[in-house]
């Protein structure tokens, strides 16, 4: 899981690469949660959402 506010683009890039590796290694555990500046959820997605889209269509 990658969580945080990053001070530099390099830090964000490193965290993103680590998250991508985790997704490749365990796609069934993949997902994201988008939070606004207050910490409230504004969006999410999981591997299983993608499976449903592929099986059922948009």
Image (cartoon, rainbow, N blue to C red):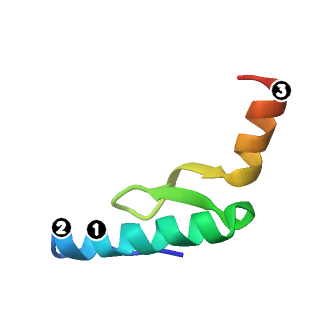
Classify residue 3 by image quadrant.
Answer: bottom left
Assess whether mark 2 and mark 1 are in contact (beta carbons under 8 angstroms): yes
Classify mark 2: residues with Cα within 10 Å, few (<14), some (14-19) or many (20+).
few
Find residue 51 and report its horizontal and vertical position in percent.
78, 42
Residue 21 at least partly seen = yes
Residue plotted at (17% across, 76% down): 7
Q: Is residue 40 left or right of residue 56?
A: left
Q: Is residue 35 left or right of residue 33?
A: left
- Give the residue pinned by disc 1: 13
Residue plotted at (60% across, 64% down): 24
- Give the residue pinned by disc 3: 56
Nearer to us in this view, 55 or 40 = 55
Alpha carbon distance from label 3 to label 2: 37 Å
Q: Compared to 19, does 54 lie above or below?
A: above
Nearer to us in this view, 49 or 28 = 28
Quadrant showing the N terminus: bottom right
């Amino acid at each position: 899981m990658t969580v945080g506010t990053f001070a530099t683009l390099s830090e964000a890039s490193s965290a993103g690469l680590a998250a991508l590796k985790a997704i490749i290694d365990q796609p069934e555990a993949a997902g994201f949660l988008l939070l606004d500046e207050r910490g409230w959820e504004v969006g999410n997605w999981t591997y299983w959402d993608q499976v449903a889209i592929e099986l059922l269509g948009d």
